[in-house]
Image: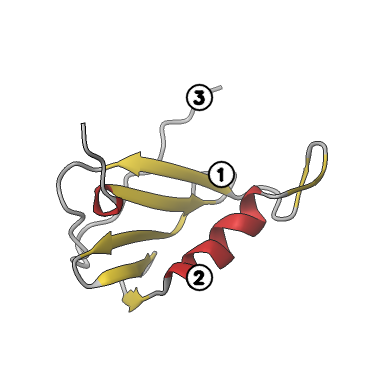
């Protein structure tokens, strides 16, 4: 199986599941789609500037951005940055 960067989407949500934005890549490069559906070009460095602080643990159990959830989703079909597309809210699991 050959995996490509264009087949993944990195989604950011609040701890309550509120969608913030996602990053994806197409033939033109990386881009960000906001909760309002606006698309912005992004460099690989900008993607990392969002991902790394949210994942970094400054001490065990203490994250730089508490409450931010990041999901990396495999999307074998190209991600459509159309304003009508917005990731579904995750199911509430108690």
- Left or right: 66 with respect to 43? right
Res 93 label = 3
Please provide percent x and percent y for residue 63: 74, 48
Q: CA distance from mark 3 to mark 1?
A: 11 Å
Please provide percent x and percent y for residue 89: 39, 43
- For residue 42, above or below residue 81: below
Q: CA distance from mark 1 to mark 2?
A: 28 Å
- For residue 20, above or below residue 44: above
Q: Nearer the viewer, mark 1 or mark 2?
A: 2
Residue reaching furthest front?
Answer: 2
- Front residue of this view, candidates 19 and 42: 42
State the residue position of label 2. Answer: 45
State the residue position of label 1. Answer: 16
Q: CA distance from mark 2 to mark 3?
A: 34 Å
Residue reaching furthest bottom?
Answer: 41
- State which tag comes first along the sequence, 1 or 2: 1
User: In which quadrant is the C terminus drawn?
Assistant: top right
Residue reaching furthest right?
Answer: 59
Indicate the secondary structure of the residue bearing disc 2: helix
- Left or right: 67 with respect to 19? right
- State which tag comes first along the sequence, 2 or 3: 2
Q: Residues within 10 Å of mark 2 (few under 14, many from 20)?
A: few
Q: Residues within 10 Å of mark 1 (few under 14, many from 20)?
A: few
Q: Residues within 10 Å of mark 3 (few under 14, many from 20)?
A: few
- Front residue of this view, candidates 18 and 25: 25
């Amino acid at each position: 199986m050959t995996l490509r960067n264009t087949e993944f989407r990195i989604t950011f949500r609040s701890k309550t599941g509120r969608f913030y934005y996602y990053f994806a890549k197409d033939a033109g490069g990386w881009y960000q789609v906001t909760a309002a559906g606006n698309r912005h070009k992004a460099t690989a460095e900008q993607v990392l500037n969002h991902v790394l602080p949210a994942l970094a643990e400054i001490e065990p159990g203490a994250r730089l951005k508490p409450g931010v959830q990041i999901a990396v989703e495999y999307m074998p079909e190209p991600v459509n940055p159309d304003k009508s597309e917005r990731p579904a809210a995750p199911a509430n699991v108690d």
